[in-house]
Image (cartoon, rainbow, N blue to C red):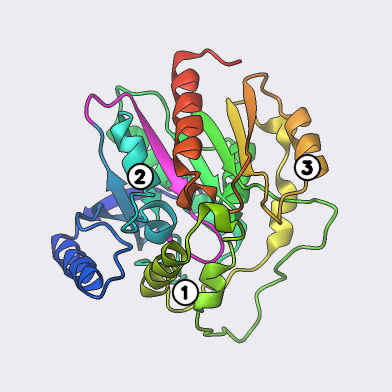
Amino acid sequence: MAARRARLTGTGRGVRRRALALALLLGALGGVAIAATPPERLSVEVAGQPLAVWARHGTNVRGTVVLVHGLTWSARPAFDFEPDSGSRSLLRALAAAGFDAYAIDLPGYGASAPEPSGWLAPESAVADVEALLAWVAQHHPGLPPPVLLGWSRGSKLAALTATRARAPLGALILYAYNLDPAAPPDHGPAEAAVPHLPNSAEWARSDFVSPAVASPRLIEQFAAAALAADPVRANVCCDAQFLAIRPEAIRVPTLLIHGARDPAFKPAVAAAFFNRLATAQRRWVVVGAGDHAAHLEDTAPEVDAAIVDFISAALAGTHQ
């Protein structure tokens, strides 16, 4: 597959105005879950297809971060969630720490149209991530190569991106990484018929398994934001492509981070992956009270601090 190139096609001012109006409407309904000051929307064209990228910018910027969402929810609910109990926006936390942060809506998610086939395979999604990494590096020539952060399925895409090593990459953050190479793939080949299945509030609630760190109101606000952004489930396929991930080929500084109560996490599998990483500059952080959505819960400050500390060390070249 030829390398994909990305180019900026617009900043979407009209879309930002509509997003602000939606946020204010949600607030009036008592369901504030997306910031009243939305992130900048960029339209980045990759292989002829415009993809939405949501950005927040720091001051005295010292680095850049590209964020990749998971299986069900797109960039804004995943990385810019702002309930009325306090911000859970990882984009905001990164910007406050001095980083320009860019979260992509992969094809079929959020504000990005599906691929022409209607299916999104890992290799295709990774090509989009590689194009965005190259675009960010090109637009920040005086800064280190971008840091890549993936959550859940996005962490598998990030690991595959690092394995391929075809794009500028300064460090890697695998959040809620749960690939078990010995298990059957979660999603098989693309099918002839493309389903159009609605997402559900039950799906949105399913990642929150720790009542002590996520109130019922927070969970319901997340469900409202998630369904507003992604009313229809994206169609993914071809998970056997993830078997190309090779930890021994990953040479950039790497952080493995997860919630201790994440039901999808397999410690023995993670340990085998972590121990085979080619880089000695690696960390493994466990968020004791967190689960699969630890960055969206009351554990968010702990997750944010661990991520910012790791990135700072990666930029400085000092890891412990």
Whether residue 97 appears in magenta in the rendering, the answer is: no
Residue type at numbered disc 3: Pro
Does any portion of residue 25 appear in the rendered image? yes
Q: Which residue is mark 2?
A: 91
Relative to residue 203, is residue 197 depicted above or below? below
Label for residue 284? none
- Point out residue 60 in the picture as x, y percentages from the top left corner: 23, 24
- Point out residue 294 in the picture as x, y percentages from the top left corner: 54, 48
Does any portion of residue 169 appear in the rendered image? no
Q: Is residue 92 left or right of residue 279?
A: left
> Which sits in the foreground, 226 or 45?
226
Task: Kindly report which numbered mark, 2 or 1, lies closer to the viewer in this rendering.
Answer: 2
Residue at point 31% right, 43% down?
A: 92
Residues marked 3 and 2 touching at CB (< 8 Å): no
- Point out residue 120 in the picture as x, y percentages from the top left corner: 55, 66
Query: Which numbered disc flags the more N-terminal residue, 2 or 1?
Result: 2
Q: Which residue is mark 3?
A: 267
| Crowdedness near tag 1: few (<14), some (14–19) or many (≥20) residues, C-alpha within 10 Å | few
Relative to residue 234, is residue 158 depicted above or below? above
Q: Secondary structure at mark 2?
A: helix
Q: Which residue is mark 1?
A: 116
Whether residue 63 appears in magenta in the rendering, the answer is: yes
Q: Is residue 206 left or right of residue 243?
A: left
What range is drawn magenta here? 59-74
